[in-house]
Image (cartoon, coloured by chain):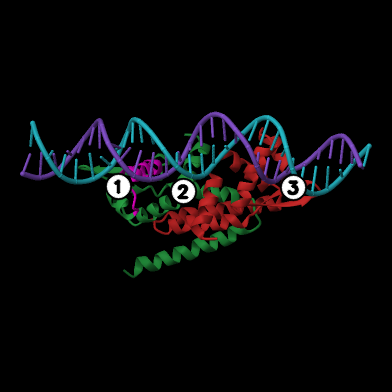
Chain colours: A green, B red, C purple, D cyan
DNA sequence: TTATTAGTTTCCATAATTGGAAAGTATAGC
DNA sequence: GCTATACTTTCCAATTATGGAAACTAATAA
């Protein structure tokens, strides 16, 4: 698919705080459509549509186990979004230094998490 | 304003390829509303609405010189978006290494640009 | 002052999003 | 087979987004 169309889908999928909240849930591990419906006080039908939208934007993917459908984060997608942001970023002053610092600080946080539990 | 609401505005503003193209234009320097209207084959009214939407999301700001309204990129906004992406990113494997490499490679490209012209 | 130019805003029509209700599909269990 | 479960899809209503046309505001020019 064309990059612009893909970015349209990704950004409009991210433009809803409920969907972003779903992604935060999925970042911590797979969840079934039904589990998401319980967490977000919406009918199964409504959740199913949000999930399809996220799947369509390639932000998540589904697997099926029996009649249960699990939603998984597609971690690769952030690379695409990051690439767009970084591309935009390439035009400014020295903001990338700040982004770099942020990334490095995050990385050390993660490494600490990896050691401790 | 609340972060979630801000992110809603930012992402939905970015969810339109024409608006992203406008931002690419503005990344290279300020442009008047009229100049944007010529570039994007839309009426001045329509462009004015897109511009207001981007301004509302704090992605751009306007300055006035006589009756001409110039649109400027608000570079700070990318930091906010990057923060969100990086936050999400903090959950994955070692994707940050890739992002870091990307940022570093971009930085060297920019430095080269700065030296040469 | 009057006319022109640069934008903004309002009005209107059309299209896309969103959500519930209910019908439809597929799997599990009896 | 029949029934229950876990979704998905369709239908419909309500809301929101988008764009042109035209009215409106503000600044420049004659």
Give how far apart the Cα atoms at labels 2 and 1 are.
18 Å
Q: Mark 2 lies on which chain?
A: A
Q: Mark 3 lies on which chain?
A: B
Percent across and percent down for residue C27 are 18, 39
Q: Is disc 2 placed on a helix, strand or loop?
A: helix
Residue in view at x 40 percent, y 55 percent: A21
Percent across and percent down for residue C9 are 67, 45
Which circle marks residue A33 in the picture? 1
Q: Quadrant of the N terminus of chain B?
A: bottom right
- The residue indicated by pointer 2 is A14
Mark 2 vs mark 3, foreground winner is 3
Q: Does any portion of residue A61 appear in the rendered image?
A: no
| Image position of B101 (left or right of C27) | right
Which circle marks residue B113 in the picture? none
Residue A53 lies within the magenta run: yes
Q: Does any portion of residue A45 appear in the rendered image?
A: yes
Q: Which chain carries label 1?
A: A
Percent across and percent down for residue A92 are 65, 54
Percent across and percent down for residue B93 are 38, 56
Same chain under badges 2 and 1? The reply is: yes
The secondary structure that dominates the magenta segment is helix
Please determine whether, in this image, residue B100 is positioned above or below residue B23.
below
Give how far apart the Cα atoms at labels 3 and 1 are.
48 Å
- The residue indicated by pointer 3 is B69
């Amino acid at each position: 698919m064309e990059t612009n169309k893909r970015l349209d889908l990704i950004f409009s999928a991210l433009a809803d705080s409920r969907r972003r909240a779903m992604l935060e849930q999925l970042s911590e591990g797979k969840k079934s459509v039904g589990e998401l419906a319980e967490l977000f006080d919406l009918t199964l039908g409504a959740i199913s549509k949000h999930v399809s939208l996220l799947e369509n934007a390639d932000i998540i993917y589904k697997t099926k186990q029996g009649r249960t459908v699990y939603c998984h984060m597609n971690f690769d997608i952030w690379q695409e979004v990051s690439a767009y942001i970084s591309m935009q970023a390439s035009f400014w002053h020295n903001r990338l230094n700040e982004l770099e610092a942020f990334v490095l600080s995050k990385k050390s946080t993660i490494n600490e998490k990896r050691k401790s539990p």
